[in-house]
């Protein structure tokens, strides 16, 4: 921001104060105001610089001095109160907060009632004012405008946005403190009434940068391809995907504060074939919803097509594609892998185990069949029951017994239809059970039969539909009763928190936690039990929920072995423990009441062990001898620089992985249960490769050798001065999982090229010539000249074998300078691209000034670098 922005207020502010001032007072006021303006300018400039560098606003908070803005890099900036607002009051903040899923503007923590613009609704409403829009006219929203007033906007009948200024100002009065608006939706910070600002003035800081690139954030990695993965369950009927679960893909934004507004987003999906060119999958995925987090874009995806027909050597992949609607710029992310499982076989079931009423009430088109099986639910004759609470859709494809409920998968578009068959006979074979009840939608009630309906067992046909297509049918059978029975006591849960278990500390057969007898005695006291009566009323311990790699024992409780813990949990197999970074896990032992015991008085007892397993691998430190300071702040980053080495008779851009770590990994010791060490490139990068690791199956010495022998190597020439590659240092655990540390390898061009000036005279009788080939100088990794005057130097031959590198020099077209256009040379400045000879022939006219042009040279060193360099061509004026 420039000082002239405030120039008009310096003198004006003094006259507005009124009265006469002395020269001394005038100078003091001028100096004071200038200092306040300078302070605000400095704060704004530094804040803008930090935002442009990628920092994101994380908090805007009022203070007694004004308002403090906090960024993601930890820096804070204070916008101070104006001179007339220094009355001890806190600064004021307007920001966006959500209420019941709707964004509103909040002033100092209080809802203004003004909604923020959201996505346009299908029927034209904006979706943020809580009302249904009519033809796009009724939905409206508000925003604080730079003119200092709230503006109202809405869609007109043509679907265009109409802007109306209200008479309500958002800027504070001169007597109030500074006010800052944090518009996180439109990416702006608005400041008013700050120290050094005129009354009514608004300063705008753009908080969003221009999106330059985006990359998939790999939350789940496919071991086969090392690519990030998104997974779906597809609901399939007659080969068509009716619906799928949602999958979420996260993309890192560059810069972090980049705006994702004003972009058209789409999916690029392909079928990749191993060692062959892929082709399109044809609309595999659809974008469901887009939101943003801290420096990332979150995309909710839907699956549109089954990939069950892919061959064994084929995978489905996708990338996110964006087109800027303003300038047409296009960007695409790296690719991620798509996996899915098709669900085709469904049944209507209840929620409990085992799965009941799986179409068991076969209702033929002729005489209904009498069914003597158990009823599915009870209906008190004076009440109602909602069949929606009883019907669940069970997908049998995953597991023929346990399966999975579509409700648990959050399948969108799943609905139920219910109907009442006209006739169904009871056990007497005469009475039609259907006559005693009414069905209204999904609600069943007893009709005028009242108490006569008690004991009847009507049935109802259920259809499960996914987006209108029937996927399963079944019947629900009710029993009408006089009153609801007293419910069973809910299970008594005795929770034992095992805490966090370090994977490296797991020893097979070691008890990790136990239930205390004190908890058992408290349970006895609560229900009036003793150890003896407990044994008579309850069955033996039963493992009702477990995880792989653990075992639980509860025999000591049942046998009242007071010298032993009543229940314990043990790690039995470290190899079986999978998914280390999951949330809290649970494993349970249940003591159920025996048959005939009053369950309304005595509950089942569940001993619930909770635990989390994490891997706290201490990775080897990067070698400080090779780490570099990328940002120039005096702090070395997790980046190692590679300039290559001489391999045989050629320079190779290659580096041993072990060299990147302290003591070349010789001093690194792995934790228990940690075996193979190996490096891989982070997925999605091209132009480099790491030699494959030969992983082993448990021998720690051999495992260590895998990374010791690995190298990272360029597979294409460097076009720029350097290129960074993200590398995963992986530690293979005993259970087959990897724990990973990521660092950066920077390949830097080992050679540099300079082109000396070519000086040509303006001669009247003949052409002036010079050899551009002799002006090219190539320097080696340590600054030595390896090529000069058209030949390879002694250092180039003996030290770097540059003469055997296969280098080539290409002479590109000459160009004019900014002062002298190429046309001004009249075609008389010429280059022989084969020999590198440059000539200037003046056709008789005396040149009155020196002219400047440029030579352009491209030096290619195969498998190392392609270097472009420019030199000056000075055409001297006539003597």
Image (cartoon, grey):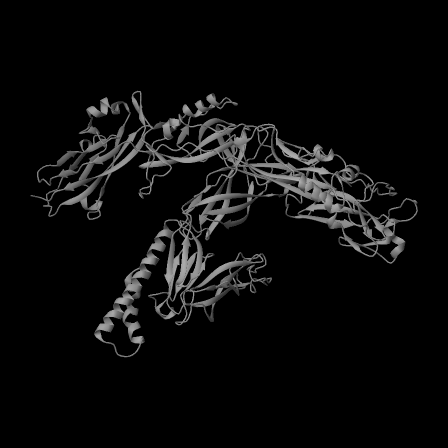
User: Would residue 278 be found to the left or right of residue 745 on screen?
Assistant: right
Q: Position of residue 658 (x, y in %)?
A: 39, 27
Q: Is residue 745 left or right of residue 351?
A: left
Question: Where, by quadrant of the figure, is residue 621 drawn?
Answer: top left
Percent across and percent down for residue 639 are 36, 36
Count the labels in the image: 0
Q: Residue furthest bottom?
A: 19
Q: Residue at x 29, y 25 (%)?
A: 806
Q: Is residue 877 above or below residue 22?
A: above
| Residue in the foreground of this view, choosing between 589 and 97 | 589
Q: Quadrant of the N terminus?
A: bottom left
Question: Is residue 114 shown above or below 689?
Answer: below
Provide residue 67's location: percent of width, then percent of height: 41, 61
Decide if residue 16 is on the left or right side of residue 468.
left
- Seen as rendered, the residue at the extreme left is 879
Rendered position, 798 above or below 756: above
Quadrant occupied by the C terminus? top left
Depth check: give the residue in front, 478 or 833. Answer: 478
Residue 240 can be seen in this image: no
Instruction: Give the quarter of the image for residue 522.
Output: top right
At a point 51% along the width and 50% down the height, the residue shown is 291
Residue 49 in view: yes
Taking depth in this image into account, of 184 and 510 the one nearest to the observer is: 510
x and y percentages locating residue 674 in the rendered image: 50, 28
Answer with left or right where residue 218 lies relative to residue 533: left
Quadrant in which residue 805 is drawn: top left
């Amino acid at each position: 921001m420039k000082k002239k922005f405030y120039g008009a207020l310096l003198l004006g502010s003094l006259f507005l104060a009124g009265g006469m001032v002395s020269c001394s007072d005038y100078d003091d006021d001028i100096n004071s105001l200038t200092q306040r303006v300078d302070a605000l300018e400095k704060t704004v400039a530094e804040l803008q610089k930090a935002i442009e560098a990628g920092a994101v606003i994380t908090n805007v908070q009022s203070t007694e001095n004004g308002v403090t803005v906090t960024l993601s890099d930890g820096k804070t900036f204070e916008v101070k109160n104006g001179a007339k607002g220094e009355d001890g009051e806190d600064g004021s903040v307007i920001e966006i907060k959500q209420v019941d899923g709707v964004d509103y503007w909040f002033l100092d923590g209080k809802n203004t009632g003004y909604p923020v613009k959201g996505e346009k609704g299908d029927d034209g409403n904006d979706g943020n004012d809580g009302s249904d829009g009519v033809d796009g006219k009724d939905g409206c929203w508000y925003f604080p405008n730079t003119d200092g007033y709230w503006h109202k906007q809405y869609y007109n009948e043509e679907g265009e946005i109409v802007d109306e200024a209200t008479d309500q100002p958002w800027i504070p009065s001169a007597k109030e403190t500074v006010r800052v608006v944090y518009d996180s939706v439109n990416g702006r910070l608005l400041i008013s009434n700050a120290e050094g600002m005129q009354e009514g003035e608004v300063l705008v800081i753009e908080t969003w940068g221009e999106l330059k690139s985006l990359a998939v954030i790999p939350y789940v990695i496919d071991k086969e391809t090392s690519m990030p993965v998104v997974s779906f369950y597809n609901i399939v009927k007659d080969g068509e995907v009716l619906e799928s679960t949602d999958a979420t893909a996260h993309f890192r934004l560059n810069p972090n504060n980049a705006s994702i507004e004003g972009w058209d987003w789409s999916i690029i999906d392909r079928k990749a074939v191993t060692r062959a060119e892929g082709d399109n999958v044809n609309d595999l995925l659809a974008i469901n919803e887009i939101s943003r987090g801290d420096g990332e874009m979150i995309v909710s995806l839907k699956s549109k097509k089954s990939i069950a027909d892919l061959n064994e050597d084929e995978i489905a992949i996708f990338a996110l594609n964006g087109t800027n609607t303003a300038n047409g710029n296009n960007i695409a992310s790296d690719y991620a892998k798509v996996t899915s499982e098709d669900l085709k076989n469904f049944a209507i079931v209840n929620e409990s185990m085992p799965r009941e009423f799986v179409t068991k009430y076969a209702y033929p088109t002729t005489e209904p069949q009498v069914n003597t099986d158990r009823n599915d639910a009870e209906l008190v004759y004076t009440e109602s029951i909602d069949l929606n609470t009883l019907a669940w859709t069970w997908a049998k494809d995953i597991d023929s017994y346990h399966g999975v409920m579509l409700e648990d998968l959050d399948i969108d578009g799943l609905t139920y239809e219910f109907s009442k068959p006209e006739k169904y006979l009871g056990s007497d074979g005469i009475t039609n059970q259907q006559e005693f009840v009414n069905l209204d939608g999904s609600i069943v009630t007893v009709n005028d039969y009242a108490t006569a309906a008690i004991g009847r067992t009507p049935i109802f046909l259920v259809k499960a539909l996914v987006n209108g297509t029937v996927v399963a049918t079944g019947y629900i059978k009710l029993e009408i009763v006089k009153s609801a029975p007293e419910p069973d006591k809910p299970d008594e849960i005795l929770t034992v928190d095992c805490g966090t278990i370090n994977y490296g500390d797991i020893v097979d057969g070691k008890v990790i936690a136990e239930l205390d007898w004190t908890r058992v005695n408290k349970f006895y006291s609560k229900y009036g039990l003793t150890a003896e009566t407990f044994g008579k009323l309850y069955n033996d311990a039963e493992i009702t929920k477990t995880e792989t790699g653990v075992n639980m024992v509860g025999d000591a409780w049942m046998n009242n072995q007071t010298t032993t813990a009543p229940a314990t949990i043990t790690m039995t197999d470290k190899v079986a423990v999978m998914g280390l970074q999951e949330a809290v896990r649970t494993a349970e032992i249940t003591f159920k009441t025996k048959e005939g015991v009053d369950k309304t008085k005595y509950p089942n007892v569940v001993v619930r062990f909770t635990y989390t397993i994490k891997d706290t691998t201490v990775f080897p430190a990067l070698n400080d001898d090779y780490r570099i300071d990328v940002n120039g702040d005096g702090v070395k980053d997790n980046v190692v620089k590679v300039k290559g080495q001489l391999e045989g008779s050629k320079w190779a851009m290659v580096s041993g992985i072990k060299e990147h770590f302290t003591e070349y990994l010789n001093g690194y010791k792995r934790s228990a249960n940690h075996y193979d060490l190996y490096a891989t490139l982070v997925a999605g990068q091209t132009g480099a490769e790491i030699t494959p690791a030969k992983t082993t199956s448990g021998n720690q010495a051999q495992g260590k050798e895998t990374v010791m022998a690995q190298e990272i190597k360029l597979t294409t020439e460097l076009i720029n001065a350097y290129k960074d590659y993200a590398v995963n240092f992986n530690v293979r655990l005993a259970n087959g999982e990897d724990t990973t540390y990521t660092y950066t390898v920077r390949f830097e061009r080992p050679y540099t090229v300079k082109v000396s000036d070519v000086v040509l005279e303006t001669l009247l009788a003949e052409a002036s010539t010079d050899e551009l080939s002799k002006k090219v100088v190539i320097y080696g990794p340590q600054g030595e000249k390896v090529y000069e005057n058209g030949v390879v130097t002694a250092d180039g031959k003996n030290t770097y074998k540059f003469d055997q590198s296969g280098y080539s020099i290409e002479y590109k077209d000459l160009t004019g300078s900014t002062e002298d256009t190429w046309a001004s040379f009249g075609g008389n400045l010429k280059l022989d691209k084969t020999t590198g000879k440059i000539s200037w022939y003046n056709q008789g006219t005396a040149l009155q000034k020196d002219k400047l042009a440029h030579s352009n040279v491209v030096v290619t060193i195969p498998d190392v670098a392609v270097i472009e360099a420019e030199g000056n061509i000075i055409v001297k004026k006539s003597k």
